[in-house]
Amino acid sequence: MKKNSVLKKAWTGLVEFVAMHQIPIMAVLILLVIAFPFMTDNKYLLRIATLCLINIVLGLALNLVQGYMGQMSFATAAFWGIGAYAGTIGVMRLGMPSLLGMAFGMAVAGLFGLLIALPTLKLKGYYLSIVTMGFCEIVRIVEMNWQDLTRGSLGIMNIPAVSIFGFRFKSGRANYIIALIILFVVTIFVKNLINSNFGLSLKAIRDDDSAAETMGINIVHVKRVNFVISALICGFVGAFYAQYVSFIHPSSFASGVSQEYIVMIIFGGLGSIPGTFLGCIALTILPELMRSLLQYRLLIYGALMVIMMNFMPGGLLGNLDLGLVRKKILERRSREAVKGSGGGDGE
Amino acid sequence: MFLQQIVNGLTIGSIYALVAIGYSLVFGVLRLINFANGAEYMLGAYFVYILMTTFGAKAPLAIPLAIVALGAVGYLVDFVGLRRLRKKNAPRMSALISTLGVGTFIENAIQIWVGTETKSYPNFLNFGRITIGKTIISWTQIIIFVTCILLMVAVSFVVYKTKIGKSMLAVSQDQMCARLMGINVSLVITLTFVVAAMLACVSGVLVGSYYQNIDTNMSFIVGMKTFAAAVLGGVGSLPGAVAGGLIVGLAESIGASYVSAGYRDAIAFAILIIVLLVKPSGLFGKNNVEKM
């Protein structure tokens, strides 16, 4: 009991400290993340770090649909896979340059996102979950069976590395930096999107769709656009991922993979950008640390989903609003200052 | 050839229909897709397998035991995953995620326990076959079809004619009102989960003895297909679930032989997406799909 309260005190203290010093802490973290590849030569570490970055981007894309729109989507892996395959085919078959290949993967994924969004998002509730689940499976089956295009279960090997203006980025370090830039751009984009009018309508729809419609929000349109944006991000990252790992296989994009992203963002916090970072980093690194438990990973994930939903539906950071904490502290301080000066007057 | 595909399609379709009824029952009462239903179906088949291989039980003992055990699992799914959420009036997505978690847990527990490789399964219903013209109908197929139809009639009878079924319908229409009428709502919900799990168990065993092998992937694929069947018929409608199951089974077996066997599993999903495009309320559903 006592230990619990100490922990709680430490946690509130930490949260308050972070809330008061947001900018310096962010600056230190960003510097650390940029300096990281130059501090180590370990390829394995760099690879895990790059995968973390890619996973955060995918987590952010999924959080747009699941956290901010409030509908569970299994399409993450499907769009990721479509982006990877389309981008690769664009580069290897159609002779596109690397960046154009990424744009192509992004466009194709967005197109499929639109195809799913058109019939499904005019309906409310669970339909999206089911359709995306089926869609993910269809995509995997097609990737597996369309031998001429995707080489089926053999996978595509020797995908050329990322190249920008004729310069090939083969090293893990360079790819880490590229992934970091992608993550940076996507994070800024998502943050602005959420705080824009569009993001506010999205949250309004999640919380009460009838009220949102009464306020004049075109809910079907907003949901469709949001879903397509999510698909575009996944597709772009997919094409980058293919050029980074240089080998893709249909089994990397099965619906079980989508489920892992769902677990990641639930763990960190639905509808929270810091939560997405925390959840994706934690659940990318933890399985690597606990190789002996690898067999039990999905078992633990299943239990985690039930426990989180029952006891912490907001995830670890879902209910945390640093801006609000900061505001409260400032208010408290100003109140104390007023009290203090008031007491001084009395003497 | 064509008639043969129809026979095969009706057999597998009747099994889909049986699982789809489980979905529809739970959906009717709670407005919730129970993602654990596919896992229960797999678990039923595996319980019988484990009882027979590890404990040496004979089929007449193993199958009823497994059905009872699955009833208990159905109860646990509701108790562990959903009861707290209902009390807190949590958003619907939380319940969806929770059942998905339970399903994942069951699936992986079985994978760790017995391994992921395909297991050969005994055929309990092998009594020879009948040949009509060029079409071969095995007794296995006939027994599966008849069992499924009987069970479906029994469930429909319970739901539409008995008192407990009427309270189910009442709960599905308005929980608050049902409670005011003196119906024990949480008992009705529990019972629905138990019945759905038992139906899933029976279908799992039937599929096992039809194909004579089982593997741990069966839960996901069949879970998806039977959901497609339920949506096709109109979720929440029992006759709809039956019709949907039979149609999906037929489409699949005809499609697999005339189009491509590799895309066999994609056919059900394609049907699902087309239904949502054209008539989201399904064939027999009431025309009140929540649009937004």
Image (cartoon, rainbow, N blue to C red):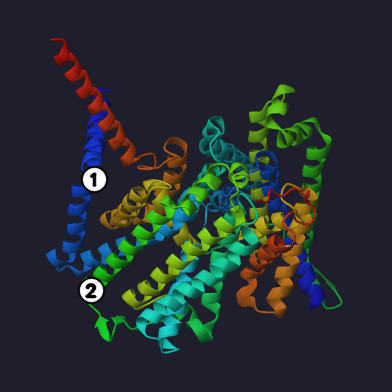
* Image point (68%, 75%), residue name: B256
Relative to A24, is A265 on the left or the right? Answer: right
Q: How crowded is mark 2: few (under 14 residues within 10 Å), some or many (20 or more)?
A: some
Q: Report the front residue among A68 and B233.
A: A68
Relative to B3, is A275 on the left or the right? Answer: left
Q: Do labels 1 and 2 share a chain?
A: yes
Q: Report the front residue among B134 and A62.
A: A62
In percent of width and height, residue A187 lies at 35, 58
Under mark 1, the amino acid is Gln
Callout 1 secondary element: helix
Specify the subunit that label 2 lies on. A
Under mark 2, the amino acid is Ala
| Residue indicated by mark 1 | A22
| Residue indicated by mark 2 | A174
Q: Is residue A114 above or below residue B79?
A: below
Specify the subunit that label 1 lies on. A
- Name the residue at the top extreme: A347
In percent of width and height, residue A7 lies at 24, 31
Q: Residues within 10 Å of mark 1 (few under 14, many from 20)?
A: some
Closest to the camera, between mark 1 and mark 2, is 1
- Name the residue at the right extreme: B133
| Upstream in sequence: badge 1 or badge 2 | 1
Q: Quadrant of the N terminus of chain B?
A: bottom right
Residue B248 in which image quadrant: bottom right
Picture disc at residue B263: none
Question: Marks 1 and 2, Cα distance to the nearest angstrom?
Answer: 29 Å
* Image point (68%, 26%), residue name: B184
